[in-house]
Image (cartoon, rainbow, N blue to C red):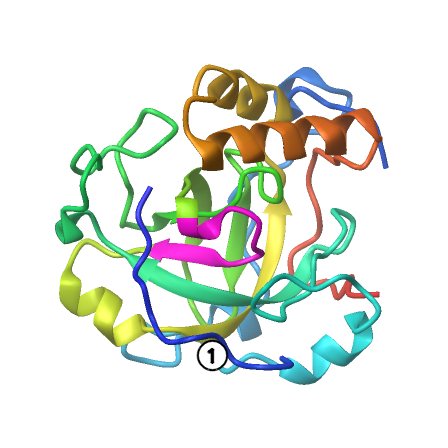
Amino acid sequence: MRILQTASALAGLTVVLLSSCSSTGVAQKEANTPASSTWTQTVGNNLPAEANVALLNEVAHLPKDKHGFPSYTDDQTHRVVRATAYSHMQNEPGAPGRMNAAGGILKYGQVRSAAADWSKYPVGTKFRIKGLPYLYVVDDYGSALTGTNTIDIFHPTLGGIKKWGLRTIEIDVVQWGSWERTLALLKGRQGYWHTRDMYFAAKKKIDNGQAVAGYSTPGRNTQG
């Protein structure tokens, strides 16, 4: 819903629609499957480990967003991405307190909320960040994220978003969200340009057979 406006990003740096994991033939697997100890080892100060930006060379052939970060395909679940931070304490106009765009409450415990372009990360997508022990779920979006590959990490305090700032992180997508729910939520919100753009981008992705739903293996490098 909201995104911290920061300095410009660092430079240079299948296949049918499945409504949800619970309603498909995908074998059930715990959504909170722990990543390897390397991934969950906390580096301190509640900040992620340094990303291996050399991995960007392996996906240099992919299209880039306006920040210069790659637009991964859904089968590439190990990613290096641009990450910002936001908080409900920013009190941006139209932001409904600590409510998320999925209709729930923004989370900040062992499971934490994140915002993204839902045509790239459908609602309910779960991922882990290298160097942090938490499970993140995409349950929010923001106009500044639309059309980009940026992930916005929720923090409950202004100090938290200032500490996070703008950084490059390494993530593993461990479960894709529901494309069916994504379309259902966005379809009724087309009065806003960013939700309309996300709706049609997600629908196009689904119609073209590019949308993947299901689980992946934490810690596995599926860059290229």
Residue 95 at what x, y percent from top left? 22, 37
Task: Return the x and y of residue 14 as percentages of the image width and height.
Answer: 86, 37
Tag 1: amino acid? Ala
Q: Secondary structure at mark 1?
A: loop
**On the image, numbered disc 1 is attached to which residue?**
49
Quarter containing the N terminus? top left
178 sits left or right of 188 in the view: right
* Magenta stretch contains residue 146: yes
In the image: residue 102, left or right of residue 90: right
Residue at x-position 42% and y-position 22%:
191
Left-right relation of 195 to 209 = left
Q: Which residues are magenta?
A: 144-153
Residue 222 placement, left or right of 179: right
Quarter of the figure with residue 214: top right
Picture layout, residue 71 above or below residue 32: below
Q: Quadrant of the C terminus?
A: bottom right
Mark 1, residues whose alpha carbon is within 10 Å: few (<14), some, or many (≥20)? many
- Point out residue 46 in the picture as x, y percentages from the top left corner: 30, 71
Is residue 176 located in the magenta-colored stretch of the structure?
no
For this rendering, which residue is in front, 113 or 60?
60
Q: Is residue 205 above or below residue 187?
A: below
How many numbered circles does the render carry? 1
Residue at 78% over, 21% down: 25
Location of residue 208 in the rendering, given as x and y in whole percent from the top left corner: 84, 30
- State the residue at coordinates (77%, 80%): 57
Q: What residue is shown at x 71% (from left), y 76% (from top)?
A: 56
In depth, the one of 181 and 198 nearer the eye is: 198
Residue 24 placement: quadrant: top right
